[in-house]
Structure formats: C-alpha cells, structure tokens
Amino acid sequence: MDRLRETDPDFAARIRFHKTGTPMPDLTGVSLVVFWLGDPLKEKYPECFAEAAGIANAARAEGIRILNSPEALSNTGKTRQSAVWYQEGVPSARARMVNRSSDLQQVCKDLGGTCIIRSDTEHAQRDVRIVRNEADARRAANECQFPVAVIQLFDIRSEYRAEGTNRSSLFARYHHKARAFVFGEAVMPSHLFFSPNLIVGLSNCLLKRESRPRRQAAHKMGYHRKLLNDMICEDRAYFDSDPVQAQTLSHAVRALGLDFAAVDYCIRPDGSIIIWEANPYFHLPHGEKSVFSAQRKAVERVNKSLDWMAENLRAAAEGRQGTPGLKYVS
C-alpha cells in the first residue's frame, strides 16, 4: 500500500480494509474482495474463517469477484496441498499425516526413506527435521509430538551430479530453492537461494552466511568472493529471465482454488520442477532490508514485484485479465 500510494494514489484511495472481528462491511460499490489472511485459515483460525466465509457469501450473492476465498485458504496444509496436487498431476512431493509414533517408520519407508517431518499447518521452518534412515525415524518417533506431516524429500543436487553437471555449477555444489509469485496465469520470479542444507530458506542460505560481518571482511581480501559473485549472478539472472515452467506454477496455484500465492520449488537438470509449497500469505521484505540489497538490486526488484502485484490487482478490480504487456505473463 505504501508503494501504491506513491505510484497510483487514485487506485490506492479506492481500497478499503476490513479488520477481523468488526461488523460486516458494506459491499455497496465494491467490485473486488481480496482475502489476505493467515493460512490454512479454517484449521488455524476457525472464528476468522467463519467471518470471512460470511463476507465471501455476501459478495457472491452480489456477484462480486473474490480473490483467495476462505475455502481456498484452507487448502494449504502440507498434506492437503499434496493430496490436491497428486490428484491434479502437479509435480510435487508426496505428504502423509502421521498420528501415531508407531506408524512413522513405515510411512517414511513408503515415501522413499528420506523425508521431512514438520507441522502440517506452518510455513516457517521451526521444528523441522530430516529423516534419512531407520535410526532417524526411530529417534523421531520417540521425540516428535504427534500428529506430524511427513513429506517426501528430493535431493535435486544429487540429480545434477548424476547427470554429470560441471562440479563448479552451484546447482551441483549446493541445494537450492526458487520462489516465484503467481497471480492467475501471470508468473513473476522472485529469488533463487543456495544452501549446503537440504531444506533451503533465507535463514540458512549461503547469501545470509556471506552477509555476516566477518565474511564481508574476508570478501575484501578476496576470500569467498567468487562464490558470492556466482550466487548473486544466478539470483539476478533468475529474476531477469522468463519464469521457469510458468504454466505448471499457475496450475499448481489454481488447483488449490487460489488466485495468488508465492510458490517455492526446485529446478531439475532437465528443466522440469518439483514444487514444495504454495504460500498465499507470503513475506516480501523491503528491498533495503534484503540480503546484499545493493548487489542484488533488491530495491528495484521489490518495487517491480509490488508494481506487478498492483497491476494484477487493478486488472482484477476492473474485470480484466493480467496485463499482457508485462514480460512475466505466462
């Protein structure tokens, strides 16, 4: 909204906000209702879901378009996403809910042996653990609080190595995670991170490590400088390129009933992808606060992303499709 007030104050002035727990909003003159709420909504916030469902039903009765309906926002638990995507043929990791510790070892074995154990309803990486063998599964059975979601884990780095990818390639040296924003059929790349860890996020990515003061001091003396430059080049090239498998990403979001989401995925050696999750309540930090902001041109990139989101929102409010003039429309 801060960005929109700068770039299009007239459109910004048309946007009204409804706070959960306040009286039902007046929908007179409203052309679009957008739900921006924590998810999975019904499972985590049932009272909020009930209120949102009432607003959605009132909007439907008036023929008002809805984006990210309350029902769709309840499809984002890990096992629910997995079930929907499996049925729809979306390339993604399988997931199972395990309610009893005695079932954990067999479920891990059924999913291929190497798995992630985590909460079914959280997007953050808190209390996430990896099971690589039977000993890990037994230990997890004794230590985890059930129920848990067990998710199939693909080692994409090993696929690059098996393909004979040059060992100097970041994809062969490290694990990676790509993120793209999806709004209907429009897709825009966000970032590409690398990490020595199988589960890749901002907190454990190599860019975050290289941003530490001692590492930055070492860069000035030439240490790790090539690695840093290579990662920044890959990340910037990813943002500047056409989105990878745009139709698959938009299909994944649409299959969940969502209209927009941030999608995390890995790129396989043959150019296909494995999707990890779709997050409709995503975080996009200010460009100034992004890791290696200047080197990654983060301020410019975040502003482009916000403007892209605003244009898609404007198009939806006016009953149009996404803007065909943007290079990021699939």
Image (cartoon, rainbow, N blue to C red):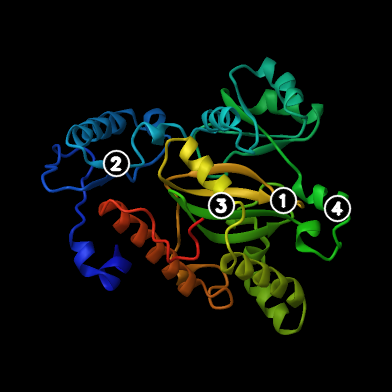
Label 3: few (<14), some (14–19) or many (≥20) C-alpha neighbours in 10 Å: many
Disc on res. 246:
3
The spot of residue 283 in percent (x, y) is 45, 54
Name the residue located 81 percent from the left edge and 57 percent from the top edge.
172
Earlier-in-chain disc, 1 versus 3:
1
Pointer 1: what residue? 197
Pointer 2: what residue? 66
- The amino acid marked with disc number 3 is Ala
Secondary-structure class at tag 3: helix
| Disc 3 to disc 2, C-alpha distance | 23 Å
The spot of residue 294 in percent (x, y) is 54, 78
Name the front one of labels 1 and 3.
3
Pointer 4: what residue? 161
- The amino acid marked with disc number 4 is Arg
Name the front one of labels 3 and 4.
3
Res. 123 visible in picture: no
- The amino acid marked with disc number 1 is Asn
